[in-house]
Image (tube, rainbow, N blue to C red):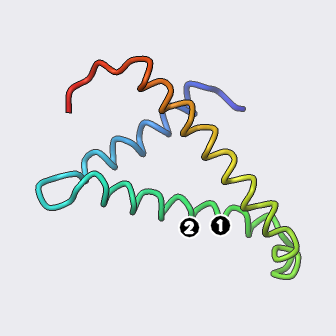
Amino acid sequence: MENQEEFLKRADAHIFLANEQINEEVTSGEVSASFMYGMTRFNAWIAACEFESAEDMSTEKEKVIEYFSSQYKNMLEEHINNHIEHFDFKK
């Protein structure tokens, strides 16, 4: 991975934007859903850019889905475990 500090700055910028969108009319669940939808659209586009044709992409579709799914699962497990270990915040 490239510079960890830059990686975390980009992640924090996305989280900051998502947090700004939560208000009396828009719930955290709604923001989460649109955030995840945007992430999947972006990742599908990133994946598509790696292939020469739709046929090539179709052939590798399950590998692409498995890659992104496993990355998401690993990251989610890490952050849930972190919250369990440090469950000292108020809503």
Q: Residue type at mark 2?
A: Arg
The circle on residue 41 is: 2
When the figure is inspected, residue 75 is found, relative to residue 36, above or below; the finding is: above
Say whether residue 32 is left or right of residue 47. left
Which residue is at the front of the view, 36 or 78?
78
Task: Provide the residue designation for mark 1.
Answer: 44
Hey, which quadrant is residue 89 in on the image?
Answer: top left
**Label 1–label 2 contact, CB within 8 A:** yes
When the figure is inspected, residue 54 is found, relative to residue 9, above or below; the finding is: below
Say whether residue 25 is left or right of residue 49. left
Residue lying at 66% horizontally and 53% vertically, measured from the top left: 69
Say whether residue 15 is left or right of residue 39. left
| Quadrant of the drawing holding the C terminus | top left
| Residue 67, horizontal then vertical, whole percent | 75, 52
| Residue 43, horizontal then vertical, whole percent | 63, 60
- Element at badge 2? helix
